[in-house]
Amino acid sequence: MKNLFVKTLISISTTLILTSAGFADTTNTTLLVNDPWSRATPPGATTAAGFMQIVNPTDQADRLVGFSAAISAKPEIHTHKHVDGVMTMTKLEDGLVIPANGKAVLKPMSDHLMLLELKDSLSASSTFTVTAHFENAGDMDIVFDVLSVEDAQAKIEKTMQHDSAHGEHGKMKGHKDKKHNQMDMKHDAPMENNTGSES
Ligand SMILES: [Cu+2]
């Protein structure tokens, strides 16, 4: 019943174009946004990108259908695609699904918020606000941190290392090594043997 009530409120508010931040905060209790960030742009730059994780702890999928931002005259939801070996950005016309009991990860070289026709360059340590429009959860104001180019690069590298570490877990080599370690421990092997079994 509560969901139905909230939905009704949202549709009424959409009709009346009531988009105050206070309203968005009180009604949007279903989705969580983690770590919204962007990268500083050089003066005169006309585009920027926004990244974050959107967590959906509910049993109902939601969809980011669009967003607005004072700093961008043309906000779009984008993804990256490999087409004939070339990375290209394409607009997600149908928005971005946030799976039930799951999350959508917006990150470099993947799904992202695209801020086209920037009205101002983004300087490091500043912030900007985006109002995200969700199909079920309604509007949500999100404050993005602008990282310096160096900090952004470090963050990307950290994320890539994390991703590849997860890939390693699935490989047979990882399991074999674990077995060896367990056996060594059981047999209480001396250090020389340990070293020998590793090579
Ligand atoms: Cu893009």
Image (cartoon, rainbow, N blue to C red):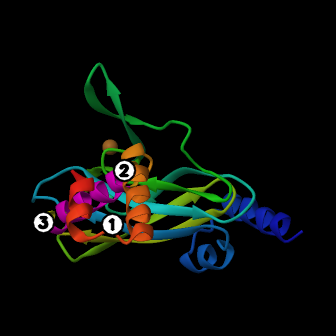
Q: Are marks 2 and 3 in contact (CB under 8 Å)?
A: no
Disc on res. 29: none
Residue 42, given in percent of the width and then of the height, sits at 10, 58
Q: Secondary structure at mark 3?
A: helix
Residue 53, given in percent of the width and then of the height, sits at 47, 62
Q: Are marks 2 and 1 in contact (CB under 8 Å)?
A: no
Q: Which residue is mark 1?
A: 37
Mark 1 surroundings: few (<14), some (14-19) or many (≥20) residues within 10 A: many
Residue 193, given in percent of the width and then of the height, sits at 25, 62
Q: Can residue 39 be seen in the rendering of this structure? A: no
Q: Is mark 2 within 8 Å of ligand 1?
A: no
Q: Earlier in the sequence, mark 1 or mark 3?
A: 1
Residue at 30%, 74% (x, y): give it.
127
Q: Which residue is mark 2?
A: 168
CA distance separating discs 1 and 3: 14 Å
CA distance separating discs 2 and 3: 27 Å
Q: Are marks 1 and 3 in contact (CB under 8 Å)?
A: no
Q: Name the quarter showing ligand 1.
A: top left
- Answer left or right for 140 relative to 107: right
The residue type indicated by label 3 comes to Glu
Q: Secondary structure at mark 1?
A: strand
Q: Which residue is mark 3?
A: 150
Highlighted magenta segment, given as a residue range = 150-165
Q: Nearer the viewer, mark 2 or mark 3?
A: 2
Q: Earlier in the sequence, mark 2 or mark 3?
A: 3
